[in-house]
Amino acid sequence: MNRKARRAGLKSKNFAVDTDPGDGSEAAVIAGWMAQASAHHQAGQPETARDICDRILARAPSHVNALNLLGLIHQASGRQKLAAKTLAKAAASDPLNAACHYNLAHSLLALGREDEAAIYFKRAIALGKRLKNTETLIFANPAITTCVDHIEEKWPFPVKADELFARYSLELIASDMFLRCALEIEPLHHASLEKLLTLIRSVLLRSTVSNFAVSDGVIVRLFGAIAQQCFINEYIFAQSDEEMRQSGQLRELLLQKLADGDAIPPLLLAAVAAYYPLHSLPAGRSLLARDWPQISADLVRQQVREPLDEAEDRKSIRALTTVKDGVSLKVMQQYEENPYPRWTIAPIAVFADDHDAIDSNMASPAKDILIAGCGSGQHALEVAQYRPDAQVLAVDISLPSLAYARRKTREAGLRNIDYAQADILKLATIGRSFDRIEAVGVLHHLAAPESGWRMLLSLLRPKGEMRIGLYSETARRTVVDVRRLIAERGYRPTPEDIRKCRHEIMRDYDERGWRTVIEAADFYSMSGCRDLLFHAMEHRFTIPRIKAFLSEHGLSFLGFDLEPRTIERFQKQFPGSAALTELDKWHAFETENPQTFRHMYVFETRRS
């Protein structure tokens, strides 16, 4: 059937695109057409789907879904130039649409425009809230999936490299640009993928010892990307005694070349950076004085320039209070050694969606906001982006965390956040009050959480709102179980012992019922794992305990922050909007669904 005949078919009763699909509005008609185009595409009828997309774009030239689908149709037919042009229009029409950026990157890659493709892959990852999670897209590569399956079949026994890469070569995996982009900019959270990356790192290390003179190519690029991932996750990957010996050997070679002024091959730099943060080297600062090819420049920026800038920035962070409480000092030491949370991608405006339900309850816009326990700044940036007219005071006990937060805030171009060091227990001395206070994941690390909460309440203005995050006793039963194991084994909160503990968890999680631990994002970084399993102080709450505190202090409960599907399940059991603010009903729901608050109880309250 030619195109003219297909178009005629669109008007027939068998495919009546002009039929009013709903309320008769233009939007409803186009929505009906789009649904039909998607159905035909999925049914293996791309030409019909293309014609419907053309019809939609004739009426709505910037229709994102139609442009994206049309771009995919062009991609599949090998028309990559046309696909790239169409997908670029889609991305321009909706800059926050991760799928459009991801699909455009693939067409640019097919056209050999690798630098541009990397930009769009990284934008897609940054916008990942609206995309499938990064790990799912990585596993779309059959070479990676096959290797991971083979590792899991043998686990916990080791797999030989020649056996692992018999079907798909390491070069084929290294050529996966999306994988490299993800490794460079985002901490990955998947146990099976970690096992593969750990093995690849050891293989590349051995090959570098034999020949470190390679200066370019996909293998060098992959090793550089793995080195960036290792820095992001704070070298959480397991390493054998032989790896420690070999990496130490290469570290000494790198230091000798620095001292002699010799050229440093990119592969050598990547190999060392995959096991040691470059700024920690005795002559690490001298790496900044050299001219580097792009393949190495990103490593030097990440592992030398940025950490040194943060170290210098600590000197200018003001202290609002002293820190003298014994528990506060222990917690401060932990976060000085391991700033938390470990994050790389600044929040984007799409995160504002999370606050829509909350804002409907707000009495008035908050002008003065306190972030109590801001950590490394991700939360503070999110709040400041969403409320650009507010002045945000973000305090934390850890200077390294605050320095990291200040650097990321400068990168984001935000000017409405003031960072300062302070102990929550002494904030009453600063002589300020706030319209809104946010303390998520902080109070349960104090010696007396309710005392800290009351301290924050003393700073809250009448009708002010609070956003609180507290650990759930019910949801953290597995964590408590693992903490017992840590005590029994005598594991300490050191990098070596954290790696050993993680290996034991990854080996035995299934039979011990610890799946929720390895599914936690915090499990995949050194600071996150320490915060999750080795914290110096941890309290856990129940909903009745929260309810008692709210009642005692006259606070209105406005609702929990939860995924929409969880809210839907709750509403099936407890219909009506009023039920969403009834804590007794939530307690009953959690009792039946123990992992409801697996991250935390995060909820909104208002002062009368």
Image (cartoon, rainbow, N blue to C red):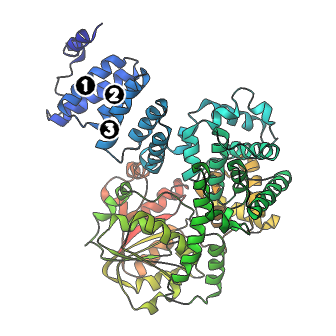
* Circle nearer the N terminus (1, 3): 1
Label 1 and label 2: CA atoms lie apart by 8 Å
Left or right: 550 with respect to 526? left
Q: Which residue is mark 3?
A: 90
Instruction: Identify which amino acid the numbered label 3 is placed on.
Output: Ala
Instruction: Identify which amino acid the numbered label 2 is placed on.
Output: Leu
Q: Which mark is residue 377?
A: none
Point out residue 76 in the picture as x, y percentages from the top left corner. 43, 23
Q: Which residue is mark 1?
A: 54
Residue 121 appears in the figure: yes
The residue drawn where x is 31% and y is 22% is 50
Left or right: 211 with respect to 414? right
Q: Which residue is mark 2?
A: 70
* In contact (CB < 8 Å): disc 1 and disc 3: no
Query: Based on the displayed image, in which of its 4 quarters is residue 594 positioned?
Result: bottom right
The residue drawn where x is 47% and y is 36% is 113
